Image (cartoon, rainbow, N blue to C red):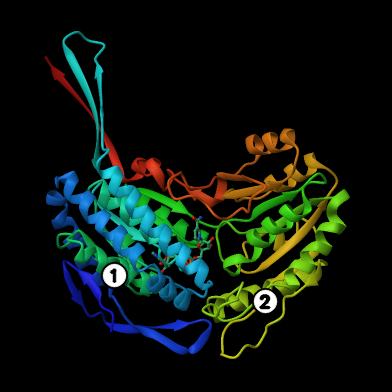
Amino acid sequence: MFRNFIDGEWVLGTDASKNINPSNTNDVIGDYARASADDALAAVAAAKAAFPAWSRSGILERHQILKKTADEIIARKDELGRLLSREEGKTLAEGIGETVRAGQIFDFFAGEALRLAGEVIPSVRPNIGVEITREPVGVVGIITPWNFPIAIPAWKIAPALCYGNTVVFKPAELVPGCSWAIVDILHRAGLPKGVLNLVMGKGSVVGQAMLDSPDIQAITFTGSVGTGKRVAAASVEHNRKFQLEMGGKNPFVVLDDAELAVAVEAAVNSAFFSTGQRCTASSRLIVTEGIHDKFVAAMGERMHGLVVDDALKAGTHIGPVVDQGQLNQDTDYIAIGKQEGARLAFGGELIARDTPGFYLQPALFTEATNRMRISREEIFGPVAAVIRVKDYDEALAVANDTRFGLSSGIATTSLKHASHFKRNSEAGMVMVNLPTAGVDFHVPFGGRKGSSYGSREQGKYAAEFYTTVKTAYTLA
Ligand code: NAD
């Protein structure tokens, strides 16, 4: 049994949930303790008690703990990457890649711990000095989704600890394995008791207890729009800082002048890699008339070559969907797309493999419009729709006609259109001739409109959320 971690101790929960491999539902990865609301409150109390000492801890200590963690994650990348692919269902290559990225994030913030700095500014009044410093916020609650089981916990835990906060961490119930491993590594790297607490279990119990606690000063959340709204409402109630990263309906524009091979590769990656279960996935392929038929034909050909199978098998391009609930959502939207009058040009069927798993052939719709539900609502699976447009201006208008704004992409050889799109796309991240997903670990990550709320994650911009600014005046 994998236990929760509260105040430096591994503790049992009320009961346990089974971590199941979506490539083979007979394969149980382990039993993971489920915390109660009281456990969550005990974790908050431990984090509160640990805050005074940790917030004043030396930067060298923080640097060393984060660096040791980074080194261990990278040294164990094959094993942890395998665990990730086994519990989430993305391919082994993707699992190892995500694990390396988690290590790099810890490494980056190990460095940031040594680069903490403030400003000294003269006052407008004579003989007075002004110092501007950043201080930790306090107890930070971290709530994460299932689709990036190691990278998202890493990009929240590493900056929280780097800047001197203490943490209560609740991972998604479907994928507790990688989160447990990160906490174990940080604990052995020398983190003092109470600084990082792990409470696994149900969102409605553990997460809700965190939202209702007046002793959490900041909550960073990644997940669905519905849960994000609850986090926001509860945080306003408690006058706490919060940050939300939520859904997307990311557009990928293909213009007549695009290089066909570049466009198809980026579109297939955006729509279907990681089984389409990325908040930055593109499910709207907005294609101008002149290249439309060639693009659709080339997509069909490329999709024929995609191997959908066990995530751990060599040669698999697309692993299974994460669970039965998500699979139902995907197939429901495929049915909705057909009813709405879009044409299912490729895929969309359930497929059987050697082991019982949630296998779905990636689906491509054509003849879709941007008004259809499949173009407006997040599906979160390997389902994409091609929307035909006249020209660049219409493509841009359609791309921006969504309540979301996380990422966007364009395939073009025109400098003019690429530059215009970078400036006018209403998204937090814009990609030119690249997939809408796949981001670096050292630069800001985040969206606009209904996709995000609050300051950016990752890179030095993370300091905005995990610190609070103090302005001090001194008479000379
Ligand atoms: P979810 O909202 O169901 O769950 C996210 C987390 O919130 C889980 O840990 C869950 O247990 C917890 N939770 C659920 N109810 C809660 C409550 N009442 N109080 C507190 N916590 C609660 O989302 P999910 O299904 O795990 O993840 C998929 C969603 O995440 C998709 O919409 C996707 O777009 C989004 N996502 C966004 C980004 C981004 O950066 N924008 C990244 C990855 C995933």
Q: Quadrant of the C terminus?
A: top left
As drawn, is 389 to the left or to the right of 131?
right
Q: Quadrant of residue 152?
A: bottom left
Q: Quadrant of residue 35?
A: bottom left
Q: Is mark 1 within 8 Å of ligand 1?
A: no
* Residue type at the position of mark 2: Thr
Image location of residue 49, percent across then percent down: 13, 57
Tag 2's secondary structure?
A: helix
Q: Is residue 32 above or below residue 184?
A: below
Q: Quadrant of residue 261?
A: bottom right
Tag 1's secondary structure?
A: loop
Residue named by callout 2: 331
Image location of residue 473, percent across then percent down: 18, 22
User: Residue at point 42% right, 48% down?
Assistant: 457
Q: Nearer the viewer, residue 312 or 4?
A: 312
Other residues around mark 2 within 10 Å, as few (<14) / some (14–19) / many (≥20): some
As drawn, is 141 to the left or to the right of 473?
right
Distance from the alpha carbon under mark 2 to that under mark 1: 33 Å
Image location of residue 109, percent across then percent down: 32, 48
Q: Is residue 393 above or below residue 218?
A: above
